[in-house]
Image: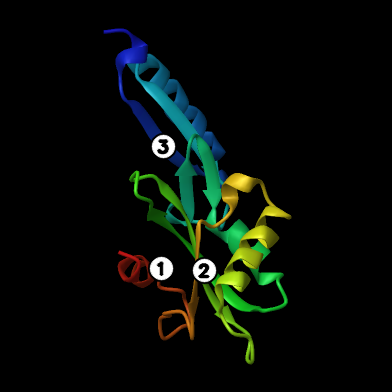
Amino acid sequence: MDKSDKAVVRILIVEDNRGDALLVREALKESNLRFELTHIPDGEKAFDYLRRRGENISSQEIEAALGRHPAVLEAAVIGRQDNDQLLKPAACVVLKNGVAGTPDLARELQEFVVSRLPVFKRPRWVEFFDDLPKTATGKLQRFKLREQGK
């Protein structure tokens, strides 16, 4: 079996630990495994990233783009599987007072993201919420959003 027949080993390395990444890369080269190292900017978490067709998609990047829209109070982006079992971005959006969540607004938000980010980062779904689930200290509970989307 040559190198191309083996499964790809994906390893996420936090940018803070570049020295460790070099050690991991050398060890994997010697093991004759196919591998891919992904560097995550310091301060972000691995589960805040989606992987789609070889591209890393940062949920925080999409959330920041959505947050620039005048109708959006806050947003969270999670991964959701489509009918083909592919993981794609889904936006969970809280609107400002007086703004109604409509299908037209959902399309507008998708277009708004595409005007600022590459098209593959466009949320495939936009859902409107009264508020997002958070801990007592105010941290977003993405796992609850993922559970609601199943």
Residue 103: horizontal and vertical position, in percent?
A: 55, 71
Q: Going by the image, does 121 lie left or right of 12?
A: right
Whether residue 41 is visible to the viewer of this picture, yes or no, is no
The answer to whether mark 2 and mark 1 are in CB contact below 8 A is yes
Of marks 2 and 1, which one's residue comes earlier in the chain?
A: 2
Could you tell me how many numbered marks the image carries? Answer: 3
Instruction: Determine the residue positioned at 58% across, 50% down.
Output: 121
Tag of residue 76 = 2
Q: In which quarter of the view is residue 33 placed?
A: top left
| Amino acid on which the number 2 mark rests in the picture | Ala
Residue 138: horizontal and vertical position, in percent?
A: 48, 82
Q: Which residue is mark 3?
A: 11
The answer to whether mark 3 and mark 1 are in CB contact below 8 A is no
Q: Which residue is mark 1?
A: 142
| Amino acid on which the number 1 mark rests in the picture | Arg
Residue 116: horizontal and vertical position, in percent?
A: 72, 55
